[in-house]
Amino acid sequence: MFRLAHISDIHLSPLPSLTLRELISKRITGYINWRSNRREAMAGGALDMVIADLKANAPDHIAVTGDLVNLALDEELETARAWLKTLGDPDDVSVVPGNHDAYVPGALKKTRLFWEAWMRGDRQSAEKSPVEFPYLRVRGDVALIGVSSARATAPFMATGDIRSKQAQKLGEILAETGRRGLFRVVMIHHPPVRGAAPSHKRLLGIGLFQRTVREHGAELVLHGHTHLSTIYQIGGPDWSIPVVCVPSASQGFASSHKPAGAFNLFSIARTNAGWTCRMTERGIVDAQMTIRTIREHELTVGAQLARTY
């Protein structure tokens, strides 16, 4: 049994002080959004409670699908690196960037440098080479495949993209790990599903992503970005692939229309018939920050999603 925890959209607080030069950019809109919407919703201790419960469940690995910071300031990136050290050893925590981690031109390059230990694939780590997406990490029978959809965008836009070069490499990794009989988990920030996010926040290249996994297969796709608890499906070679989003780990209870902080825990096991995967949603359920199991799902690989109870 391999236990994989999934968190996303950390949006670490508090926001550092900004210089006038830093504000004269897209960051001014993000700063206003933080002060008017996210500051109170994400600075109330929810993240600490969620992470404490996650660690108490002792997962074998943690997947973090982006938006660790807010405006991609250097001070934020350093704070996030320190936070990642408290979350777990780089071998046990895999990170992909989100749009807030690539907020302005040049930010994504810095993000790769600050968080490289949590973003390097096994081969890159062995060769001590720079971060490259997609990356592959194999832990037991599980292949963790990190895809970057992060990009700098214009003000009021939060789109991501996947292009042909990355999709081609993703296909190669999926094919290789499929031949090895591994349970393939693809991590990406933006939802690779049409209609899952509004047009100004969507993934550009959804069709390319879906064609790639349809041809080569995958067992599970994890994403963030929408701050919602959702399960979609996309087509695989001969089966439906679950596409799962988790709420923001930092969201306070009843502080907005979005669900409170939560994480998902996937229990993955090989059987004579293939795989089983049970998904447990745990999160904050009241103003006292009580955390408990919200729902459980059996995600049956190779068939439609089974019962929810």
Image (cartoon, rainbow, N blue to C red):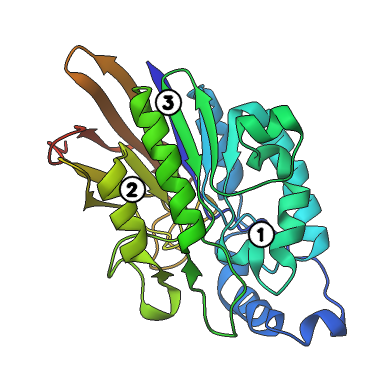
Q: Which residue is mark 1?
A: 69
Q: Is residue 177 above or below residue 35?
A: above
User: Which residue is label 2 attached to?
Assistant: 244
CA separation, marks 1 and 2? 21 Å
Q: Residues within 10 Å of mark 1 (few under 14, many from 20)?
A: many
Label 1 sits on a secondary structure element that is loop
Q: Dot 2: few (<14), some (14–19), or many (≥20) neighbours within 10 Å?
A: many
Question: Residue 106 in the image: x percent, y percent?
Answer: 75, 69
The amino acid sitting under disc 3 is Val
Q: State the residue lying farthest toward the top.
A: 272
Sequence-first disc among 1 and 3: 1
Answer above or below: position of 27 versus 172. below
Q: Find disc 3 in the rendering and name its residue.
A: 142
Q: Which residue occupies 25% across, 23% down?
A: 275
* Secondary element at tag 3: strand
Residue depicted at 30% across the width and 61% down the height: 193
Q: Nearer the viewer, residue 308 or 184?
A: 184
Q: Tag 2, which secondary structure?
A: strand
User: Residue type at mark 1?
Assistant: Val
Residue 212, placed above or below residue 31: above
Q: What is the quadrant of residue 272 in the picture?
A: top left
Quadrant of image for the N terminus: top left
**Disc 1 vs disc 3: which is toward the camera?**
3
